[in-house]
Image: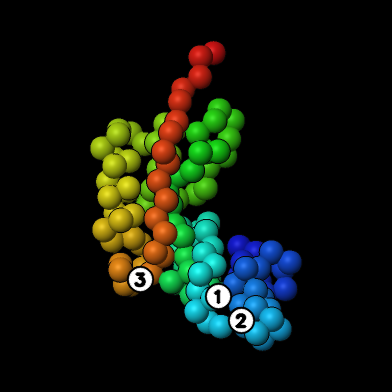
Amino acid sequence: WLLMCERDSGYNYGEYVTDKFLIDYGWSQKDLDKIKIWDSGYPKEPGCCGKVARNRLAIQNDDHDQQNPGSTSRDMAEHGCVLIKDCDSSDHHRHFETKLFNDPRGMEDNDNDAPLRLILSSYWWTEH
């Protein structure tokens, strides 16, 4: 269960922050929409429990800290793989990166939902 799903978790950038900025601070919806939130559930459980507007989401598959020996990876089930650890080939990984931009899981409007798409830009294997 993601803390994002629990309004009063103390780690909620969804409903709590939305209300805080719109109601308490008097921000406009246009200004609030400029604040983007990483959807840590993507690709397995996309959408931040429905607690963050889709136009505020940033999505990615694997990330840099998953590349290091001993690191734990987010569970992506059959919807993704970590490039140097869990993918059976670079083509397998490329498929998920292509999907991220062309038809991301859980997003209905590819032009407006999750407008920020992040990719892993560098990785390396260490000598043991």
In the image, taking residue 12 as reference, residue 52 lies left or right, namely left
Q: Amino acid at mark 2?
A: Trp
In the image, taking residue 123 as reference, residue 72 lies left or right, namely right
Local crowd at mark 1 within 10 Å, few (<14), some, or many (≥20)?
some
Residue bearing mark 1:
32
In the image, taking residue 111 as reference, residue 10 lies left or right, namely right
Q: Is 34 rendered above or below residue 61?
A: below
Question: Number of callouts in the render?
Answer: 3
C-beta proximity under 8 Å, tags 1 and 2: yes
Foreground label between 3 and 1: 1
C-beta proximity under 8 Å, tags 3 and 1: no
Q: Find residue 112 and name its label.
A: 3
Q: Is 60 rendered above or below residue 57?
A: above
Q: Position of residue 87 (x, y in %)?
A: 36, 36
Q: Amino acid at mark 3?
A: Asn
Kind of element beneath mark 3 = loop
Foreground label between 2 and 3: 2
Q: Position of residue 92 (x, y in %)?
A: 29, 40
Query: Residue visible at 41% across and 65% down?
Result: 114
Kind of element beneath mark 1 = helix
For marks 1 and 2 on the same chain, the one whose residue lies earlier in the sequence: 2
Q: Amino acid at mark 1?
A: Leu
In the image, taking residue 21 as reference, residue 52 lies left or right, namely left
Q: Position of residue 7 (x, y in %)?
A: 67, 74
Residue bearing mark 2:
27
Kind of element beneath mark 2 = loop
